[in-house]
Amino acid sequence: MNQYEVMYVIDPTLEDSARTELINRFSDLVKKNGGEVDRVDEWGKRRLAYAIQYKTEGYYVLM
């Protein structure tokens, strides 16, 4: 089976519970479609290379 990595950036103003729910939703989406999630690394809040919708920080997650 091929292995893939997914990096996504979440709005840093979300509360911890909402952020955890969103991360679980992405993992469940992969599992529902026949994939397997080995690990989820939360890199935390980091500065974006350029502003996206006037936001300069994001919460990075590597799955």
Image (cartoon, helix red, strand yellow):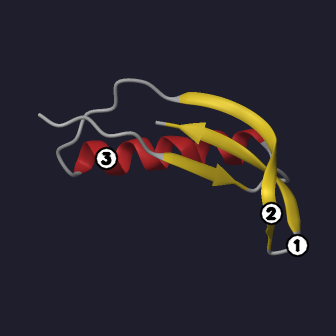
The percent position of residue 41, horizontal first and vertical second, equals 56, 27
How many neighbours does mark 3 have within 10 angstroms: few (below 14), some (14-19), or many (20 or more)? few
Measure the C-alpha gap from mark 1 to mark 2: 9 Å
Q: Give yes or no for contact between labels 1 and 2 (Cβ–Cβ under 8 Å).
A: no
Which image quarter: residue 50? bottom right
Q: Position of 21 compared to 47: left or right?
A: left
Q: Quadrant of the N terminus?
A: top left
- Extreme-left residue of the structure: 1
Q: Nearer the viewer, mark 1 or mark 3?
A: 1
Q: Nearer the viewer, residue 49 or 13?
A: 49
Res. 27 in view: yes
Amino acid of disc 1: Tyr
Q: Which residue does the numbered mark 3 point to in the structure image? A: 30
Query: Which residue is found at the position 44% from the left and 45% from the top?
Result: 6
Q: Nearer the viewer, mark 1 or mark 2?
A: 2
Q: Nearer the viewer, mark 2 or mark 3?
A: 2
Of callouts 1 and 3, the N-terminal one:
3
Q: Tag on residue 20? A: none
Amino acid of disc 3: Val
Q: Which residue does the numbered mark 1 point to in the structure image? A: 54
Q: Which residue does the numbered mark 2 point to in the structure image? A: 50
Query: Which residue is found at the position 80% from the left and 39% from the top?
Result: 45
